[in-house]
Image: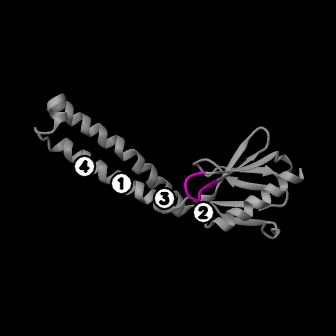
Amino acid sequence: MNPPIQLPKEYSYSPRWRVFAFVALLSGGVTFMMAYLADHPNAFMPIFKLLGPSSATSFFRLAAIGCALPGIAALLVLARRCFGHRTLELREGEFVVPCGAFERRARVPYIMIKRVWETRTVGNNQSLFVSTGSDVYTIKSAFFPDLETYATVRDFLQTLATES
């Protein structure tokens, strides 16, 4: 159990950049390969024999567009992370958590917290769920700088839930 928190307190809460950089690079590489195959038809490839040259070219162009979409999304997340600092705030009487992709922030009064529970996923990733009865907010350990910071927030919110 961590020592009590002096309010107000602000914690960095952003997704890790390495995963998104990897997705952007991988997506870019596959997109480049699909575009290359669309512009350089090879009669020995099975898809060209199955669909014919013009349909196979269209297939590879559509595949290139489909492969580019995750890369574009990852680049947008990286840009948002670089140019906007997301924080989770513990204030007197409420906590403020970022939610959604467009910098929306939810203010949750402590008296509204009905239940707090945690799930563990792959590796050291954990998710904390905070229920107010009508809404459930998710706080992910992967968005904190380290697990110790996540544990501090988790313990604080679980203490509040048991008190109410």
The magenta span reads: 121-126
Query: Disc 4 marks which residue?
Result: 33
Task: Name which of mark 3 and mark 1 comes first in the sequence.
Answer: 1
Query: Disc 1 marks which residue?
Result: 26
Query: Disc 3 marks which residue?
Result: 78
Task: Name which of mark 2 and mark 4 comes first in the sequence.
Answer: 4
Q: Is the magenta stretch mostly helix, strand or loop?
A: loop
Task: Name which of mark 3 and mark 4 comes first in the sequence.
Answer: 4
Q: In this view, does 48 lie above or below 10?
A: above
Q: Is residue 1 above or below residue 133?
A: below
Task: Name which of mark 3 and mark 2 comes first in the sequence.
Answer: 3
Identify the residue at image location x=61%, y=47%: 100
**Cα separation between marks 3 and 1:** 15 Å
Type of amino acid under label 2: His
Q: x, y (%) of residue 158? A: 79, 55
Q: x, y (%) of residue 2? A: 78, 68
Identify the residue at image location x=75%, y=51%: 107
Relative depth, front residue between 27 and 150: 150
The image quadrant of residue 132 is: top right
Disc 2 to disc 4: CB gap under 8 Å: no
Q: x, y (%) of residue 57? A: 20, 36
Identify the residue at image location x=79%, y=39%: 133
Q: x, y (%) of residue 163? A: 89, 53
**Cα separation between marks 1 and 2:** 26 Å
Number of residues whose C-alpha sits closer than 10 Å to that of mark 1, classed few (under 14), some (14–19) or many (20 or more): some
Type of amino acid under label 4: Met
Q: Is residue 106 above or below residue 22?
A: above
Q: In which quarter of the image is the N terminus?
A: bottom right
**Cα separation between marks 2 and 4:** 35 Å
